Image: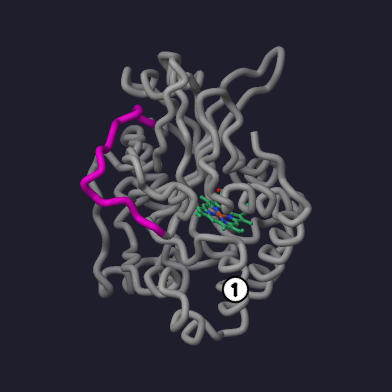
Amino acid sequence: MSTPTKGNDEDAKKVVDLFRDIFGYHPGFRAVHAKGILLRGTFNPTSEASSLSTAPHFRRRSTSVIARLSNSGGVPTQLDADPANNQNGLALRFLLSSFPRREKTDIATVSTPFFPAGNVPDVIGFFRALAAKKVEEFIRTHPAAAAFINAPKPFPSSFATQQFFSINAFKLVGKDHKVTYIRYRIVPKDGVFHLDEKEAASKPPNYLYDELVKKLETGPIEYELLAQIAETGDVTDDCTVHWPETRKLVKLGVVTLESILPNSDEEQKDLEFFDPVPKVEGIEPSGDPLIDLRSVAYRFSGADR
Ligand code: HEM
């Protein structure tokens, strides 16, 4: 289990402060992914999942989940098709037990596989450049940041047609202590459908959330939880180094989102932050330094709600 360091505390605080410089300070809301909605549902694993990891939610027939779908920016009133903030988030909490001890583990994913930086100094450098409106200058000397800025980030037609990536790698440990490095993907059962620019520009401010409410009246939304499997030699501690698309994808299970949580707006303020550090046997961080940095940053941001 990884322990946050003092260095991480200072660095994470710096990044959260930079988010507030970029998006403004909105008390009661997340520093980023400020606009979102909480749902409840279930996770049903495949048999492949339990052969890769001893994690309880991969061994049980069914586990309750809480999910939060979000927009990526730090402004709670952000338009869903705002070109300045065109990413979505999907955070999942697997509720493993409530007694005698509350046990849970989380996955937080976003809708592009790109992240602008693979180490702590570059994360700070990127968001500092963004806050100072000097990104153009920064990307000239930072190819990963350039790849992130230039990556297409189309708006989805619906949350139910958006796909999501953990970006960071994780280490799955099986019964025989066999280690497999993976990156999660969450893929909608309805297929991936995006809007073109003209369609996006014509959408109402909250089109994703309005559509979600209507869609859930007709039935649940389903996503497949997949693991992209690393091969020997693949980089697992730098999320800007992508693994070839030919890497095997293993289906770990199906996430079914059934309903919006009553009092979602209040509940998402009270909810303990989604922690990128795994909290169960059978899943460990990969050595990617951003996992700890994220965990501490989420704690700082969450402490302010
Ligand atoms: C590397 C890939 C990353 C992914 C996939 C990711 C994903 C997410 C998601 C889905 C959320 C929303 C959680 C929720 O709904 O409550 C979130 C929130 C957040 N992220 Fe990230 N993130 C990444 C990197 C980072 C980094 C490097 C930082 C800063 C060091 C960061 C800082 C934050 C903060 C402060 C929040 C708000 C947490 C809260 O207040 O609960 N993220 N992220």
* Residue at horizontal 36 percent and vertical 42 percent from the top: 186
Residue type at mark 1 is: Gly
Look at 53% across and 47% down and name the residue there.
37
Question: Magenta residues?
Answer: 241-255
Identify the residue position indicated by label 1 in the image: 125
Q: How is the image coloured?
A: one colour
Q: Is residue 104 above or below residue 274?
A: above
Q: Left of 169 or right of it: where is 217?
A: left
For residue 242: magenta?
A: yes
* Horizontal and vertical percent position of residue 58: 43, 21
Residue 140, picture quadrant: bottom left
Instruction: Kindly indicate the quadrant of the structure image that contains residue 270.
Output: top right
Residue 208 placement (x, y as % from top left): 40, 55
Please give the name of the residue rendered at 39% of the width and 39% of the height, measured from the top-left corner.
182
The answer to whether residue 182 of the structure is visible from this angle is yes
Question: Residue 222: in sight, yes or no?
Answer: no
Image point 26% across, 74% down: which residue? 198
Q: Nearer the viewer, residue 126 or 91?
A: 126
> Looking at the image, is 194 positioned above or below residue 150?
above
Q: Nearer the viewer, residue 63 or 8?
A: 8
User: Which of the four quarters of the rendered structure image does ligand 1 lie in?
Assistant: bottom right
Q: Helix, strand, or loop for circle 1? A: helix
Going by the image, does 180 lie left or right of 104? left
User: Which quadrant of the figure contains the N terminus?
Assistant: top right
